[in-house]
Amino acid sequence: AGIDERGKPTDVFWTLVFTRLFWIFCFAVFTIFLVAKTRARIRSKYSIPEKQCPGCEDFCCSLWCNCCTVAQMARHTADYDTYAGLCCSETGTPPHAPSIV
């Protein structure tokens, strides 16, 4: 369906490729935005100042190392040394664990 009789990609093929790339790009932008907003909310809640990039530190962290930023937020909001992490729970920790450490 994506290759013509000469062995070259058809317009349908390129349409599918660019549609898929568009959605991947949208998901990446949404993820970066969501992590940056969550990080900003955590910093605000715990009164943590920006040090490296005032005004855009949350965005920069979520853009350049998204997985590190998520790990940092997880470490700050729960005590995983004391309470084991749970995959399918509301907070990621056991019900008896304090919600904010």
Image: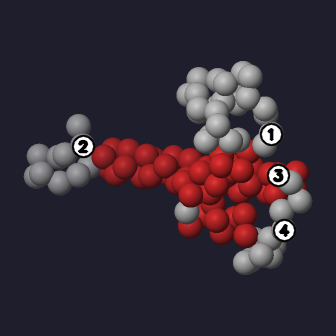
- Quick check: 99 above or below 7? above
The disc label shown at residue 49, or none:
4
Q: CA distance from mark 2 to mark 3?
A: 46 Å
Q: Secondary structure at mark 1?
A: loop
Residue contact between numbered discs 2 and 1, judged by CB atoms under 8 Å: no
Q: Earlier in the sequence, mark 4 or mark 3?
A: 3
Callout 2: few (<14), some (14-19), or many (20+) C-alpha neighbours within 10 Å? few
What residue type is disc 4 on? Answer: Pro
| Camera-side mark, 4 or 1 | 1
Residue contact between numbered discs 2 and 4, judged by CB atoms under 8 Å: no
Residue occupying the point 67% across, 24% down: 94
Callout 3: few (<14), some (14-19), or many (20+) C-alpha neighbours within 10 Å? few
Q: Secondary structure at mark 4?
A: loop
Q: Earlier in the sequence, mark 2 or mark 3?
A: 2
The residue wearing badge 2 is 2
Q: CA distance from mark 4 to mark 3?
A: 12 Å
Residue occupying the point 10% across, 52% down: 6
Q: CA distance from mark 3 to mark 1?
A: 14 Å
Residue occupying the point 58% across, 28% down: 86
